[in-house]
Amino acid sequence: MNDTNKTILVTGCAGFIGSNFVPYFLEKYENYNIVNLDLLTYAGNLENLKEVENHPRYKFIKGDICNRELVEFIFDEYDIQGIIHFAAESHVDNSIKNPGVFVETNVNGTYTLLDVAKNHWMEKPFVYKEKYNNCRFHHISTDEVYGTLSDDPNDLFTEKTPYAPNSPYSASKASSDMIVRSYHHTYGMNTVITNCSNNYGPKQHDEKLIPTIIRNALAGNPIPIYGDGKNIRDWLYVLDHCKGIDLAFHKGKSGETYNIGGRNERTNLQIVDAVCKILNETVPPKERIGKESYKELVNFVEDRAGHDRRYAIDATKIENELGWRAGETFDTGIVKTIEWYLNKYGVQ
């Protein structure tokens, strides 16, 4: 670690978005050290961070964000002067089976981080210690806190959309958002929240939709699609999301929320079509699995309980106030994504 640098705590870096964010951030900013606190649950994998594991400005600590004693030690030992909080239980199906884990990690973990940060940085409500005047807590959240939308293409989530979470996962994230908000309004903490749409790209966990399509197609296994496959999501390339987080962390207004979306609405069926079309061209299915198209593997399964029909984000606020723009369309981003997974699965 460089002692003259500002050291920030970034939680959950071994997960999908965090492991894309850390290499990007370290390369862009030479004046930051990063301490990564990650429990390495099933969704966290240090292989995702191979390219930075020996980086002189990066430190990994295995541990639980709910462990107050550990979090206090990290703040004292590394003099933490900012937090970017990715760590969360995030798989909706798992939240339906075991909601308590989501409440513990997403709600209590966020509270622990906030409270330790407040005590480390602040003299009293609305008064920061002189050294910590510019310290910020950036909370990464999801568009799922807003509930579901109608089929009207003009119906979009904005920062003023009332919260209406419909799964234990989204309810736990909504709760954590509210705790962050309360620490800003009650204690004057410098906080910012970003709510993103569905991310895709390299390093995503195999359980998610796009990796599942690719993995099952290549293996000749059924590609499971919930319900009628017409649920709509707004797809955001992960590196575009990382750049939005960077902007909000550095330039966002304290106490504000910024929605980050790709303006790339697709049904799950359209996602399957796009992925299978590219795979048909790059890894001919006739030779690999004896079929004319990978799309023949699609298998409709019982819909998820409480499955929201449509999400779509209006990203006007972050675009206008902070100058963020998504660099990837879905058509360009999905090609990069599939190339990464073909390499991961050893398919040339």
Image: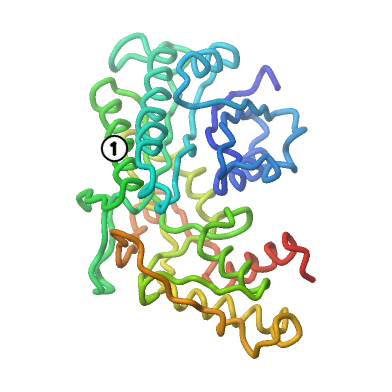
- In x, y percent, where is residue 132? 46, 17
The quadrant in which the C terminus is found is bottom right
Residue at the image point whose x is 67% and y is 45% from the top: 48
- In x, y percent, where is residue 339? 69, 67
What is the basis of the colouring in this image? rainbow
Is residue 280 something one can see in this rendering? yes
> Hey, what amino acid is under mark 1?
Ser
Q: Which of the pair 336/101 is nearer the observer? A: 101
Q: Which of the pair 90/248 is nearer the observer? A: 90
The quadrant in which the N terminus is found is top right
Q: Residue furthest top?
A: 123
Q: How many marks do you count on the picture?
A: 1
User: Label 1: few (<14), some or many (≥20) within 10 Å?
Assistant: many
Is residue 343 placed above or below 256 in the rendered structure? below
Question: Which residue is label 1 attached to?
Answer: 175
Q: Is residue 182 left or right of residue 97?
A: left
- In x, y percent, where is residue 224? 49, 70
Q: Residue furthest left?
A: 162
- In x, y percent, where is residue 106? 39, 36
Is residue 72 placed above or below 214 in the rendered structure? above
Is residue 50 placed above or below 233 in the rendered structure? above
Residue at the image point whose x is 54% and y is 32% from the top: 10
Q: Secondary structure at mark 1?
A: helix
Residue at the image point whose x is 70% and y is 86% from the top: 290
Residue at the image point whose x is 44% and y is 53% from the top: 323
Which quarter of the figure has residue 198?
bottom left
Q: Is residue 47 left or right of residue 129?
A: right
Is residue 250 something one can see in this rendering? no
